[in-house]
Structure formats: structure tokens, C-alpha cells
Image (cartoon, rainbow, N blue to C red):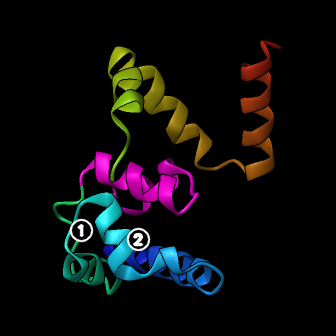
Amino acid sequence: MINALGKYIREKREALRETDRRYTLRKVAGHIGVEPSYLSKIERGETSAYLTEEKIRLLAEYLNEDPDVLLGLSGKISQDVQEIIRRRPQLFAQLIRDLKRMPDHAILKIVREVRDGNW
């Protein structure tokens, strides 16, 4: 997980840096409130132990990424999703287990139906 998150962040940051100097390691680290050396370690896959949900959300916002993607790559789930699951743990556990065997297009169809109230 750590390697996936770091690789993803580095690739995204470096791609953005090609056209905008605000995406240097030092500037991104400053924006999210960590030392550049720490962000470098994250990007190299050496650590992410103290990267909180708040910092991951700041990073996602700065890199124009989905925070749930970065949280997932770091092995975390957002607090709001955790709370939803805690309210009905058995139902959501079964739903997630059933969904793991479904192709993406089928899951997207279910998501759209729920979102649009067509159930």
C-alpha cells in the first residue's frame, strides 16, 4: 500500500510540475504541513505512518485528486465512510463482499440507481 500511494503521488506531482512550478516537492510539502524530507520518503514508499486523513485530503486537494483514492492507496477509509459502515456493519460488510465479484460497469449501474433514487 505504501509503495502504491507514494508512486501515485510522485507521478501526479511530477506531471503537474512540468507545467507549474508550484508542484515542487518542497512546495507541496509546505502546503500540507510536512517536511520535504518526509514527503520524499512517502513518495519513495518508505513511510506513510503519520500521514493523517487531514493531510491526505489536503494533498488530494492540492493535486486535484479524489481524496478517497489517496486514502485507499494509503490503506485508510475516510471517517465519514467509517461512520456509515458502523451504523449497519453487517449489511455493508455483505454488500462489499458481494460487490467484489462484480465488474465495474455493474457496480457503476448500482451506484447510479441508488444516487438517482431508482430503486
Read off the residue under disc 2.
Answer: 5
- Compared to 77, does 61 lie above or below? below
Position in image of residue 111 (x %, y %): 72, 31
Read off the residue under disc 1.
Answer: 48
Position in image of residue 25 (x %, y %): 37, 81
Position in image of residue 43 (x %, y %): 35, 81
In the rendered structure, which segment of residues is drawn in magenta?
52-75
- Which kind of residue does numbered mark 2 sit on? Leu
Mark 1 crowdedness (10 Å alpha carbons): few <14, some 14-19, many ≥20: many
**In the rendered structure, does residue 54 fall within the stretch colored magenta?**
yes
Position in image of residue 109 (x %, y %): 81, 35
Residue beneath the point at 16% across and 60% down: 50
In the rendered image, is residue 8 in sight? no
Q: In the rendered structure, which disc, 2 or 1, sits on the residue that comes first in sequence?
A: 2
Residue beneath the point at 51% across and 40% down: 97
Q: What mark, if any, has residue 107 been given in the picture?
A: none
Q: Is residue 58 left or right of residue 35?
A: right
Q: Is residue 5 left or right of residue 107?
A: left
